Image (tube, rainbow, N blue to C red):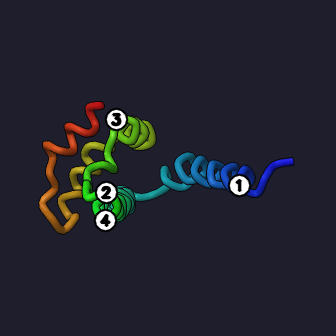
Amino acid sequence: MKSDFEKFIEEREKQFTKFWSEEYPELSRDEKVKYWLASTHKGMRTQGEALADEYSEFSKKWYDHAINVEPDFDKIFKEAVSNIGFEFNWEEYNKRIQG
């Protein structure tokens, strides 16, 4: 019998898969930009508060996932972070996603 935690993890994985395979592809370009903007802003803020390193959110694994689920990721992400509300450090970002 599965524990509640195992059931929780399975459900989260199903939701994750459903979002990326069914829901995300149906978003308009503007909605995709807004998704990446909100996700990035929240992630950087959380990482900044927890680790004092906003850019620790980014990694090669994260980037590989992003370009796998969004073939036009680099253009969409550039547009998203242009609206992030602070100066985005592209040098630091690129360093993190190189692996």
The reply to whether the C-beta atoms of the residues labelled 2 and 4 are less than 8 Å apart is no
Q: Position of residue 76 (x, y in %)?
A: 29, 50
Mark nearest the camera among 3 and 1 is: 1
Separation of marks 4 and 1 at Cα, in angstroms: 27 Å
The reply to whether the C-beta atoms of the residues labelled 4 and 1 are less than 8 Å apart is no
Query: Which residue is tagged 2?
Result: 51
Query: Which residue is tagged 3?
Result: 60
Q: Earlier in the sequence, mark 4 or mark 3?
A: 4
Of the residues shown, which amino acid type is indicated by label 4? Glu
Give whichever of 60, 64 is nearer the camera: 60
Q: Residues within 10 Å of mark 1 (few under 14, many from 20)?
A: few
Q: Say whether residue 20 is left or right of residue 41.
A: right
Separation of marks 4 and 3 at Cα, in angstroms: 22 Å
Separation of marks 2 and 1 at Cα, in angstroms: 26 Å
Q: Position of residue 87 (x, y in %)?
A: 12, 60
Image quadrant in which the C terminus is located: top left
| Tag of residue 49 | 4
The reply to whether the C-beta atoms of the residues labelled 4 and 3 are less than 8 Å apart is no
The reply to whether the C-beta atoms of the residues labelled 2 and 1 are less than 8 Å apart is no
| Tag of residue 45 | none
Residue visible at 63% across and 54% down in the picture: 12
The reply to whether the C-beta atoms of the residues labelled 3 and 2 are less than 8 Å apart is no
Residue visible at 40% across and 36% down in the picture: 61
Query: SS for tag 2?
Result: helix
Query: Which residue is tagged 1?
Result: 5
Of the residues shown, which amino acid type is indicated by label 2? Leu
Residue visible at 40% across and 58% down in the picture: 28
Mark nearest the camera among 4 and 3 is: 4
Q: Say whether residue 64 is left or right of residue 2.
A: left
Q: Position of residue 18 (x, y in %)?
A: 61, 51
List the single residue furthest toward the bottom: 85
Q: Residues within 10 Å of mark 2 (few under 14, many from 20)?
A: few
